[in-house]
């Protein structure tokens, strides 16, 4: 249950540099807009190649510029919840959830995740009919059902009203405490960082 990250990347005029080691629980990447939080998540996910550095999750080297290792995004087993939910608009909630689910996944795990997320009643709905909080929960479910080795959450509480925010916070606390996956979450809200983070890394 650990992240060991040391990456650098130039994007446009910005020099992004992020370095941290974190054991277990939920690690918050905290910092102002434009500091490079999303870019760091993208580098860990394999969507953005660092100019230099090393990314190790749970002892698995995902990227190492010194030895030329760069594991393909689909082999990194990352559950990535983007800032906007990015559900497939032409697929029902059930089809969105089943997308990317591994073939030998057992149904009890599916049921458990649906239960934790409280989205069983939404299965036949289309993404455009979901509220912001519901869409966010489905996006989290889709990420969890892909059997990830770790989770990346990019501002999972942004643009939600207070009751919906509270709902998703409780959910993230349950994921942190019950799933046993390393979680890296981006926020620029100190209340979220204090409540959810096992530790906070300032970017
Ligand atoms: N495609 C791009 N072209 C040029 N500059 C970019 C590009 N993508 C990101 N940047 C710059 O890289 C820096 C880091 O952006 P990034 O989105 O990682 O920051 P962030 O900390 O996640 O910000 P926010 O909290 O606003 O989402 C910013 O200065 C941004 O303007």
Image: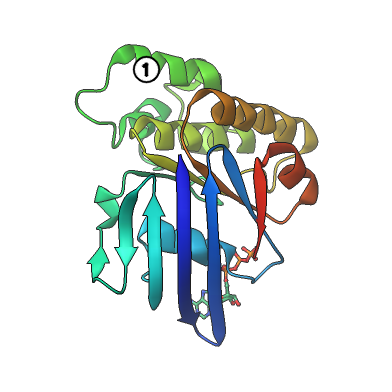
Is residue 178 depicted above or below 147 in this figure? above
Q: Quadrant of the N terminus?
A: top left
Circle 1: is it few (<14), some (14-19), or many (20+) Cα within 10 Å?
A: few
Location of residue 117 in the rendering, given as x and y in whole percent from the top left corner: 54, 23
- The front one of 131 and 141 is 141
Q: Is residue 113 left or right of residue 189?
A: left
- The reply to whether residue 9 is visible in this rendering is yes
Residue 155 visible, this angle = no
- Quadrant of the image for the C terminus? bottom right
Q: Is residue 74 above or below residue 100?
A: below
Look at 24% across and 65% down and name the residue there: 69
The quarter holding residue 165 reads top right
Q: Is residue 3 left or right of residue 103?
A: right
Q: Quadrant of residue 54?
A: bottom left
| Mark 1 residue's CB less than 8 Å from ligand 1 | no
Residue 166 sits in which quadrant?
top right
Q: Position of residue 185 (x, y in %)?
A: 58, 48
Q: Secondary structure at mark 1?
A: helix
Picture coordinates of residue 70, whole percent (x, y) = 26, 64
Residue designated by label 1: 109
Along the line of sight, the residue nearer the viewer: 19 or 115: 19
- Percent from the top left, x then y, of residue 59? 35, 48
Q: How is the image coloured?
A: rainbow
Please tell me in which quarter of the rendered image ligand 1 is found. bottom right
In the displayed orientation, state which residue is furthest to the left: 103
Q: Residue furthest bottom?
A: 13
Q: Residue at x 49, y 21 (%)?
A: 122
């Amino acid at each position: 249950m650990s992240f060991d990250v040391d990456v650098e990347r130039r994007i446009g005029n910005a020099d992004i540099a992020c370095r941290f080691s974190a054991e277990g629980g939920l690690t918050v990447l905290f910092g102002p807009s434009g500091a490079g939080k999303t870019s760091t998540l993208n580098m860990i996910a394999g969507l953005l190649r660092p100019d230099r550095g090393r990314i190790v999750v749970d002892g698995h080297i995902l990227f190492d510029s010194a030895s030329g290792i760069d594991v393909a995004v689909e082999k990194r087993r990352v559950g990535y919840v983007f800032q906007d939910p990015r559900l497939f608009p032409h697929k029902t909630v059930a089809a969105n959830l089943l997308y990317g689910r591994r073939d030998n996944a057992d149904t009890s795990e599916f049921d458990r995740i649906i239960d934790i997320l409280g989205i069983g009643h939404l299965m036949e709905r289309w993404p455009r009919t979901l509220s912001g909080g519901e869409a966010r929960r489905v996006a989290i479910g889709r990420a969890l059902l892909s059997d990830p080795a770790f989770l990346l959450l990019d501002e999972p509480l942004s643009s939600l009203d207070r009751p919906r925010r509270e709902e998703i916070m409780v959910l993230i606390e349950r994921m942190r405490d019950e799933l046993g996956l390393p979680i890296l979450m981006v926020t620029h809200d100190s209340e979220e960082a204090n409540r959810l983070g096992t530790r906070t890394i300032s970017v």
